[in-house]
Amino acid sequence: MSSADALEQLAAQIRSCQKCPLGRLRTHAVPGEGPADAEIMLIGEAPGYHEDKQGRPFVGASGRLLEKLLAQIHFTREDVYITNVVKCRPPANRDPLLVEIEACQPWLRQQIDLIDPLVIVTLGRFSMAQFLPPSARITRVHGQPMMQEDRAITPMFHPAAALRNANWMRDMEADFVRIPELLAKVRALRAAREQEGRGPEQLSLF
């Protein structure tokens, strides 16, 4: 089975998931979308109103901002894989609960394994918390990539938060501009490791 087929099979399982109460409240689950061989994976927090209605990630104002930021680095949303930590909309767009995050963690891990991205961009603190220590604060570490295994994790503000805060918007724009350089470095690092037969390093500064 190809990675694309496996990813679609996984999406079908997510759409029928009832592992937490959100499964009974949703209009549509939102597995994510993008190519199975995407080098960049963007991970948000949870679907909102528009995402729940359409079954697609980041289709409201946050999605338009994300598309604008991607365009500035010569990418489109079709070039990257976009998903969320939680696959169903929490009521009234509240923060996802721990039980909901834990229920969805296996889905996210399987997506990462299948896509095997070079760069993961976490959008917001709930996404960042899946990869960075609990002591990490997004206002301090945003835009600072870290190597985890053989890929870079770079935390950024959530687009919805950037839309509400002009300073965070400037920070997010500056952080996005550095993605192509980061991607090139990780691409070269992976190639060198494969050539030399070295194993991936665990969580170290990039």
Image: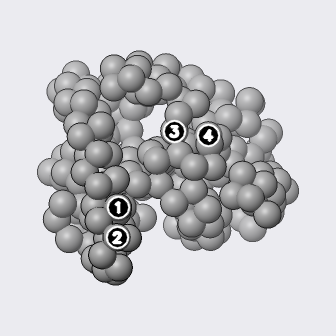
Amino acid type at circle 4 is Gly
Contact, mark 4 vs mark 1 (Cβ under 8 Å): no
Residue 175 seen by the camera: no
Report how far apart the C-alphas of labels 2 and 4 lie in the structure. Answer: 29 Å
For the N terminus, give its image quadrant.
bottom right
Residue 198 seen by the camera: yes
Contact, mark 3 vs mark 1 (Cβ under 8 Å): no
- 42, above or below 129, in the image: above
| Label 3 Cα crowd, 10 Å radius (few <14 / some 14-19 / many 20+) | many
Q: Would you identify the image quadrant in which residue 146 lies?
A: bottom left
Along the line of sight, the residue nearer the viewer: 75 or 13: 75
Amino acid type at circle 1 is Ala
- Residue drawn at x 72%, y 52% is 4
Question: Residue 20: image x %, image y %?
Answer: 72, 64
- Among the two numbered marks 3 and 4 on one chain, the one whose residue lies closer to the N terminus: 4
Amino acid type at circle 3 is Val
Q: Nearer the viewer, mark 3 or mark 1?
A: 1
Report how far apart the C-alphas of labels 1 and 2 lie in the structure. Answer: 6 Å
In the rendering, which numbered label is found on residue 34? 4
Q: Would you identify the image quadrant in which residue 149 lies?
A: bottom left
- Among the two numbered marks 4 and 1 on one chain, the one whose residue lies closer to the N terminus: 4
- Residue drawn at x 19%, y 51% is 144
Contact, mark 1 vs mark 2 (Cβ under 8 Å): yes
Q: Considering the numbered disc 4 on the image, is that residue within a helix, a strand or a loop? A: loop
Q: Considering the numbered disc 3 on the image, is that residue within a helix, a strand or a loop? A: loop
- 129, above or below 198, in the image: above
**Residue under numbered circle 2:** 195
Contact, mark 3 vs mark 4 (Cβ under 8 Å): yes
